[in-house]
Image: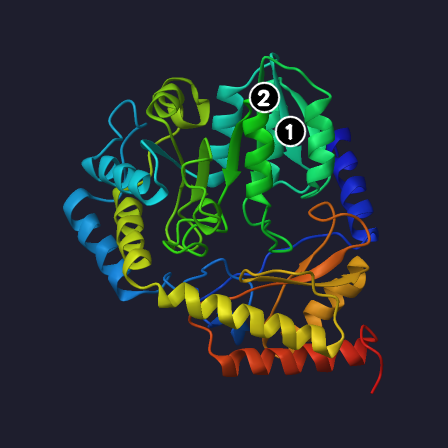
Amino acid sequence: MKPVFAKLEKSLSDIKAGGLFRKMRYLETPQAPYARIGGREVLLLSSNNYLGLCNDDRLKKAACDTVNAYGVGSGGARLLTGSYELHRRLEQELAVFKGTEACLVFNTGYMANLGTISALTDKNWVIFSDSLNHASIIDGCRMSGARVVVYNHCDMADLQRKVSAWRPEFALIVTDGIFSVDGDIAPLPDIVEIAQRRGILTMVDDAHATGVLGPHGSGTSDYFGLRDKIDIQMGTLSKALASEGGYVAGRRVLIDYLVNRARSFIFSTALAPAAIAVSLEALDIIRTEPQRRESLLADAIWLQERLRSAGFHVPESRTPIIAIIVGDPDIAVSFGEALFAEDIYIPAIRPPTVPHGTSRLRISLMATHTRADLERAADAIERVGHRMGVLGSK
């Protein structure tokens, strides 16, 4: 064996010893409240399919019609042969949806963050980044060459202190809108106030908020009434919109600059036309069916309260993401496996995704879950929690 592979084996052994080894489970059916995994039907409580659109007949028809009209592949990068009129239409509609001048679609949300931050900022910039920001933001900051100042999670006093300590020529505050592990919402009004006092740009990652929060369903800036106050609004098409891709919305000059400088955009083959058509159809449903997100958020609050009343440590969240903190990674994995044995799929989240000592089960709800589904899940979680000693014995 070559030395490098022995090194990899040792690293994997260490990962396993720490209870952090990951493996994949494979779905055999669509993303729906109930899915088949390994030949078993399970209650799926781990999907980012927040509005339940992944198996919606209207989206499937849009995809099929577009494949028949345009074929299956895009054929090239966006600046070569990969741009279709569908791309232009989606970017225009997303700009209206987000209340901005323009928008640019990327292949993934990860690529949107990576490309935007690394193209916009350099060694002359200071970036103020929340300590629990998504890995794509962290990697974009690292690639940029900018000085990165990390502030404590949603701690506005800490952010204010750190902003006051610097006098850079250019600066950016970047934050998740909804944090993907605990489901808490960034305090955007305070962030905007701090940024405006110092002339600092603001960027919000609305991957988990697009389609879910706000009177128009367009995210955290909409939720707080700040659609015209956030300079860079990023989001994904792969969660509530049930498609593929990410986007960045903002001023026309920003979008034109990214077209010419964002490497993850320039050097990637474009998304297939069918994915764009699905996003357009989903965007229309978000506009016309607000009851989906309204019932989703009401169910999320109900389930959180039920779990807290049972004695679980559930961080405050007003979103479809619900965390049950158990602490130890082995306990989190065992808890998830015990639930899977009862045909309920809730994955364990462990370091390095979360800090050591905060391993948890992460629930994410869909608008198509029924209250009976959630009752069943809550009963099983409580039962397993008592059996494993996570809750006090009855």
Crowd tier of the residue under label 2, counting other residues whose Cα lies within 10 Å: few below 14, some 14–19, many 20 or above:
many
Q: Does 334 sit above or below residue 142?
A: below
**Please, is residue 270 above or below residue 305 in the view?**
above
Classify the position of the N terminus by image quarter. top right
Label 2 with label 1: CB-CB less than 8 Å: yes
Q: Looking at the image, which residue is at 40% across and 54% down? A: 211
Q: Nearer the viewer, residue 19 or 132?
A: 132
Residue position for label 2: 171
* Local crowd size for mark 1, using a 10 Å CA cut-off: few (<14), some (14–19), many (≥20): many
N-term mark: 2 or 1: 1
Q: Callout 2: helix, strand or loop?
A: strand
Name the residue located 83 percent from the left edge and 52 percent from the top edge.
17
What type is the residue that disc 1 sits on?
A: Phe
Quarter occupied by residue 58 = bottom left
Q: Secondary structure at mark 1?
A: strand
Q: From the viewer's perspective, is residue 126 above or below residue 204?
A: above
Label disc, if present, on residue 337 of the rendered structure: none
Indicate whether 318 appears above or below 151: below
Q: Nearer the viewer, residue 383 or 293?
A: 293
Q: In this rendering, would 97 be left or right of 118?
A: left
In the displayed structure, does residue 371 sit left or right of residue 146?
left
Which quadrant holds residue 182? bottom right
Question: Could you tell me if residue 310 is visible in this image?
Answer: yes
In depth, the one of 89 and 295 nearer the eye is: 295
Q: Position of residue 27 (x, y in %)?
A: 49, 63
Mark 2–mark 1 distance (CA, rounded to whole Å)? 8 Å
Residue at 55% x, 24% y: name it: 200
The amino acid at mark 2 is: Ala
- Give coordinates of residue 385: x percent, y percent: 76, 76
Q: Which residue is mark 1?
A: 128
Out of 297 and 258, give the one closest to the viewer. 297
